[in-house]
Structures are given as structure tokens and as C-alpha cells.
Image (cartoon, rainbow, N blue to C red):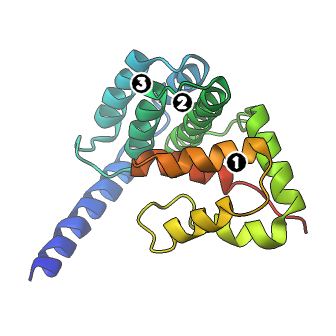
């Protein structure tokens, strides 16, 4: 019965969200422009303003699991995140801008508009990681599959196996960093960036 009740509640939430989305005039919003400013500034006050605007414009509850609000929460966490290492902080800055770029794409889609994809240059430590992956695809690529999901049963073993490869210094720094972190959302933010590596064809 608990499972059925949870299903019915979630079904209702999804249907209400879909109805609200279809019922709105999607072209009359400046949310995409505000999100682009957020990409440039990473300003927390602007992020909170965008959240309020989105809830009002699309008539979603504050507790909604909408992917736009979920990514806003991830970005808020990332903006507040600071490490005692300049390379890792540059990686976090890249994570922030990638999340903001994804928010921009979602906001444009909901407003039924198009624009060029926002390009974000890679930090040096990530360039080194991707070069390591290129040289070690056979052993390393399968280990990226679950690296973004702290709850996955193979997360710990895959991360440990990755750490036992012949890592260069920048890649070792990223993997050791992930092993120290406990927060599921931070693991997701790092791991999802690492999984953007595209193998050779």
C-alpha cells in the first residue's frame, strides 16, 4: 500500500507539472537571460531570484522535483563549495558554469526559444584527466560508468580500481579528492563531468 500511495502521489505531481507547462505562454519570460547572467556572475542572489521567477512563471510548488530546480540546487551547492587547492577550485568553477549552461538550455527549451550552446573552456586538471583517459581507455573507461553515483553498488569498487591504475598526478588528485568526499551531490557534480569524456571511435 505504501508503494501504491507513493506512486499515486508522484503520478499526480508529474501530471500537474505537465499541465502547468502546457498551460503557460512560454515565450513571455526573461528567465533565459537571467540564467545567462548567472552563468557569467555565479551570483547567489541572482540564483535565488531565478528560482522564485521560475516557480511563479511555471506554477510549480517549491518542493517540486523539476529538473530545473534540481539543477539550481546543485549549482547553489557548487557556488558555495571551496577547497584548499587552486586546481580543484578551478575545477569547481568549471562545474558551476557547466551547471549554469545546462540551466540555460532548459530555460530556453521551456520558453520555446533557441540559442547557441554556451561554451566553457576546460580547466587544466580536466584536460590532463581526459588525456589520461585517451591513453588508458581499455582499463579506465569501464570504471567511469558509475563514478557519478555514490549510491550505486559498484561505485566504491570502481573508484578503488581506478585509483590502482598507473595515474598521472592531476588524475590522481581528482580520484583522491573523490575518495575523500562523502556528499552524494558533490560526487555527482564531479563524476558527471568526468563521464563527459568521449572515447575514440
Helix, strand or loop status at disc 2: helix
Q: Residue at x 55, y 38 (%)?
A: 99
Indicate the quadrant where residue 115 lies: top right
**Residue position for label 3:** 47
Q: Say few, some or many: other residues with alpha carbon within 10 Å of mark 1 (under 14 / 14 to 19 / 20 or more).
A: some
Q: Is residue 175 above or below residue 141?
A: above
The alpha-carbon separation of the residues under discs 1 and 3 comes to 33 Å
Q: Is residue 25 visible?
A: no
The alpha-carbon separation of the residues under discs 2 and 1 comes to 37 Å
Q: Earlier in the sequence, mark 3 or mark 2?
A: 2
Q: Which mark identifies residue 107? A: none
- Which residue is more in the foreground, 104 or 182? 182
Q: On the rendered structure, is 179 left or right of 23?
A: right
Q: Position of residue 82 (x, y in %)?
A: 49, 26
Indicate the quadrant where residue 18 lies: bottom left
Q: Residue at x 27, y 41 (%)?
A: 59
The quadrant in which the C terminus is found is: bottom right
**Residue position for label 1:** 172
Q: On the rendered structure, is 112 left or right of 22?
A: right
Q: Is residue 181 above or below residue 96?
A: below
Q: Earlier in the sequence, mark 2 or mark 1?
A: 2
Q: Is residue 171 above or below residue 92?
A: below
**Residue position for label 2:** 32
Answer whether labels 2 and 1 touch (C-beta < 8 Å). Answer: no
- Which residue is more in the foreground, 1 or 87? 87
Q: Position of residue 63 (x, y in %)?
A: 23, 46
Q: Say few, some or many: other residues with alpha carbon within 10 Å of mark 3 (under 14 / 14 to 19 / 20 or more).
A: many
Amino acid at each position: 500500500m505504501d508503494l501504491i500511495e507513493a506512486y499515486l502521489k508522484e503520478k499526480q505531481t508529474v501530471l500537474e507539472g505537465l499541465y502547468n507547462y502546457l498551460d503557460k505562454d512560454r515565450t513571455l519570460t526573461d528567465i533565459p537571460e537571467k540564467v545567462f547572467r548567472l552563468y557569467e556572475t555565479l551570483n547567489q542572489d541572482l540564483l535565488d531570484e531565478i528560482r522564485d521567477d521560475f516557480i511563479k512563471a511555471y506554477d510549480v510548488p517549491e518542493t517540486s522535483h523539476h529538473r530545473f530546480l534540481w539543477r539550481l540546487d546543485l549549482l547553489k551547492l557548487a557556488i558555495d563549495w571551496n577547497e584548499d587547492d587552486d586546481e580543484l577550485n578551478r575545477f569547481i568553477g568549471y562545474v558551476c558554469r557547466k551547471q549554469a549552461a545546462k540551466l540555460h538550455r532548459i530555460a530556453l527549451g521551456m520558453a520555446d526559444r533557441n540559442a547557441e550552446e554556451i561554451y566553457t573552456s576546460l580547466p587544466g586538471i580536466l584536460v590532463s584527466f581526459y588525456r589520461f583517459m585517451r591513453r588508458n581507455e581499455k582499463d579506465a573507461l569501464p570504471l567511469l560508468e558509475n563514478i557519478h553515483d555514490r549510491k550505486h553498488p559498484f561505485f566504491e569498487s570502481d573508484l578503488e580500481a581506478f585509483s590502482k591504475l598507473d595515474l598521472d598526478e592531476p588524475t590522481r588528485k581528482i580520484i583522491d579528492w573523490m575518495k575523500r568526499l562523502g556528499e552524494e551531490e558533490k560526487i555527482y557534480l564531479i563524476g558527471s563531468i568526468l563521464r563527459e569524456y568521449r572515447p575514440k571511435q
